[in-house]
Image (cartoon, rainbow, N blue to C red):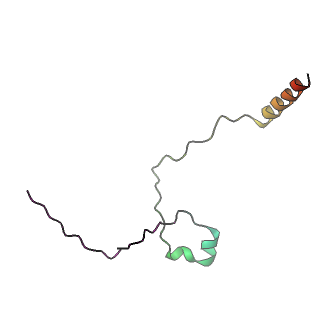
Amino acid sequence: TLKSFWIRKGSAFSTAVARPETELTPEMIATGSWRRLPFKPYNFSSLGLPPACGHLHPLLKVRSELRQIFLEMG
């Protein structure tokens, strides 16, 4: 079996790699530049970053710091 393909430059051909914008900033909104910029599509099915957990309560941090100070004092 012989397969052949014809490859031509399309209307969106470019030699430069254009990175789409990922964030909409207040400056973009104020100047109106967001209208002509390409934006990266959102992936709503991605899981995202895991939540940060396992932190001590602020009062427990203070208690442990005071305990360490008293232990160093003797």
Q: Residue furthest front?
A: 15
Give me the residue at 47% from left, 63% from top: 40
Q: Residue furthest left?
A: 1
Q: Position of residue 54 (x, y in %)?
A: 66, 34
Give me the residue at 23% from left, 70% from top: 7
Judging depth in this view, the residue of 10 and 28 nearest the camera is 10
| Image height of 25 relative to 66, above or below | below
Magenta stretch holds residue 24: no
Quadrant in the picture for the C terminus: top right
Q: In the figure, is residue 23 to the left or right of 68?
A: left
Q: Position of residue 25 (x, y in %)?
A: 61, 67
Q: Residue furthest top?
A: 74
Q: Position of residue 44 (x, y in %)?
A: 47, 53
Quadrant hosting residue 15: bottom left
Magenta residues? 1-21
Quadrant hosting residue 24: bottom right
Q: In the figure, is residue 20 to the left or right of 14?
A: right
Quadrant in the picture for the N terminus: bottom left
Give me the residue at 50% from left, 76% from top: 36
Give me the residue at 45% from left, 50% from top: 45
